Amino acid sequence: MAQPDTIERILDSAAALFAERGYTETSLRTITSTANVNLAAVNYHFGSKKALIQAVFARYLTPFCSYLNSNLNEAEARQGAPLDVDEAIEILFSSLFQSAREVDSNPEQFMRLLGLAYTQSQDHLRHFIIKEYGETYARFMDILRLALPDVDPTVFFWRLYFMLGASVFTLSSYKPINNISVADFDQDRSIEDVVSFLIPSITILLRGSAE
Amino acid sequence: MAQPDTIERILDSAAALFAERGYTETSLRTITSTANVNLAAVNYHFGSKKALIQAVFARYLTPFCSYLNSNLNEAEARQGAPLDVDEAIEILFSSLFQSAREVDSNPEQFMRLLGLAYTQSQDHLRHFIIKEYGETYARFMDILRLALPDVDPTVFFWRLYFMLGASVFTLSSYKPINNISVADFDQDRSIEDVVSFLIPSITILLRGSAE
DNA sequence: GTCTATAAACTGATAGAC
DNA sequence: GTCTATCAGTTTATAGAC
């Protein structure tokens, strides 16, 4: 019984399971049985579990960085001047939604994986990400730095991580948090709504003032 | 060879190892050999690995909530009026430092454990924490709500998680982030310095404006 | 209360038939 | 490219001697 898309099925199942419960907590047996493929298929197609983890990330990050770069190019060309903070942040999240749509997944899953890359100490994964996507990361940080010339460099540096933490934490736990919102306040918010709250909050946090 | 403080030794090693690499990634063998106790000691004294995880948390959270409550009581009594946002946030972090000092540990380790409780899907742990410490949590949230009457309730709700994410993420990764700061900018910042950057950032984020 | 020894189950990975 | 069978290593947990 030939499965033409074994690789895709494995990637789909792995992404969902990793995001749901973490890397160490997800066994190859769980992945292959969820994907309805043979246990040996992962090692045959990817070589190892580590290589599978990296492949899952590449499927997200490659289109994301591609969208981010072209969106930044387009905005800078249209503007003929360096971008503002809120414009840069806006582009960051719209690139996130675009790439999630392309992979036919959701931004929440992407954010959960990204959060895991930080919290689970997967050194091989951090090295892989920096090596493959570090350039785009540096570009975006430079844009923010340029947009905030009055902020002390050290304070700016740490605010970047405040921003990263607020975004990754909230979006990666969007569903359970929204469940609390529904239960306690009868407010059901889409992830787009949450991002619309997040963008001004992040902007003001980075600026350190309202204007 | 009688070890009088086997339980304490296990708790110390477990807290350090869990914070460093996560729960699933830390085996009882690693814990017991680090603590210089026998492998069977964990199951003898705590019953199971899950119970050990909860015990590690209790040792942090009990003094923390106790400090937080008494600091809030004292400030409210002294003031005779509801607390301001920045005062409440200030108390939150000073309680964190106080309790970390009492357990003879560091706030970073505490934050890492707290972050893991969210990211690693340890349902038993989340239930345990809510059951044991939910009351203090609710009290603090009410104080913030009262201090920000003009903020839309839904927006306020989500900003709480932006705040939580910024704090937990940054402080739990304090050391690696600071290493980047040292390497790239020759700036070595203590965790107290970082919290001094964090408090105004969080305050302005919650308020949504500079004043 | 501490130890050894071991049970029972799980893990990632691979050899070899088809 | 898919499958079964299996290896070698790990895990948590426990029974029983001391």
Image (tube, coloured by chain):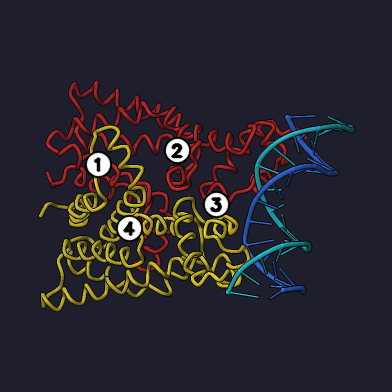
Chain colours: A yellow, B red, C blue, D cyan
The local secondary structure at tag 1 comes to loop
| Tags 3 and 1 on a common chain | yes
Q: CA distance from mark 2 to mark 4?
A: 35 Å
Q: Residues within 10 Å of mark 1 (few under 14, many from 20)?
A: some
Q: Amino acid at mark 2?
A: Ala
Residue at image position (32%, 49%) is: A170
The circle drawn on residue A107 is 4
Q: Residues within 10 Å of mark 3 (few under 14, many from 20)?
A: some
Query: Mark 3, mark 1: which one is toward the viewer?
Result: 1
A125 over B193 or under it: above or below:
below
Q: Tell me, yes or no, if residue A108 can be seen here.
A: yes
Q: CA distance from mark 4 to mark 1?
A: 17 Å
Q: Amino acid at mark 4?
A: Pro
Does A150 sit left or right of B21 as displayed?
left
Q: Which residue is mark 2?
A: B100
Q: Amino acid at mark 1?
A: Asp
